Amino acid sequence: MIENTGMQNMIEKITEIVKEELVTTEREELIRRRKAQAEIHKMEQEKYEINKIKFLGKPHTVRMLNLLRETQKINEVTGYIDIEYGTAYYLLSSYEDIYNKARKYISSDGIKFKNMLSKQDFSTGEKILVKLAANLFNSNNYDIAPIDIIGYLDDELFDVAMSAIMMRRNENLTLGILVNQMALKG
């Protein structure tokens, strides 16, 4: 009987240890699932944000894609876009007038914002977009404040400015996303 009690105690202890291990494993699995769900949610949120980029029709998208291709700012293997150039090109290609004025200051070596701003005659709204492009491109300080964007841009240009900011924040912009945007906008 004494041996049975000892054996029974040992079985109970082993059972407790196994139960604790199961609880710990279940807890760890729950934590892993929650982390995975949070990561999925984050990725879905980023996808949502990038899909909110507003193109002003196919001409806008085509002009931007042409600049990216001509200056070789798309990785041919991965489809990733150089985000600094992509954001600047997005703004500089938004309107045909801006695009035509900016075109001669763009090359695969860079964008000559200083020359562009001093030699071209931009409207107030166009100048704000060009200055925003310069700031998002490489943090140049071209005297642009949020109040300029809010106060001087019409709704359409405001949406373009906000889209550029969201675009710049996303490090994973790909050609596929732009092509999808072009298809969605008709």
Image: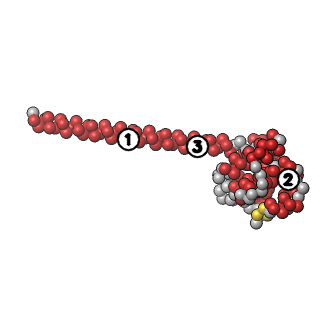
Quadrant location of residue 84?
bottom right
> Which residue was labeled with disc 2?
98
Which mark, residue 25? 1
Identified at 75% across, 41% down, the residue is 184
Q: Earlier in the sequence, mark 2 or mark 1?
A: 1
Disc 1 is placed on an element classified as: helix
For the residue carrying disc 2, how many other residues have a C-alpha within 10 Å: few (<14), some (14-19), or many (20+)?
many
Q: Position of residue 16 (x, y in %)?
A: 27, 37
> Which residue was labeled with disc 3?
42
Amino acid under label 3?
Lys
Identified at 16% across, 38% down, the residue is 7
Q: Position of residue 20 (x, y in %)?
A: 32, 39
- Relative to 126, 53 lies left or right: left
Q: Quadrant of the C terminus?
A: top right
The residues tagged by marks 3 and 2 sit, at their Cα atoms, a distance apart of 35 Å
The residues tagged by marks 1 and 3 sit, at their Cα atoms, a distance apart of 25 Å
Disc 3 is placed on an element classified as: helix
* For residue 36, above or below residue 87: above
Q: Residue furthest right?
A: 121
- Relative to 175, 57 lies left or right: right
Q: Residue furthest top?
A: 1
Compare residues 116 and 108 and report the one nearer the observer: 116
Identified at 74% across, 57% down, the residue is 141
The residues tagged by marks 2 and 1 sit, at their Cα atoms, a distance apart of 60 Å
* For residue 7, above or below residue 99: above
Amino acid under label 1?
Thr
Compare residues 32 and 166 and report the one nearer the observer: 166
Disc 2 is placed on an element classified as: helix
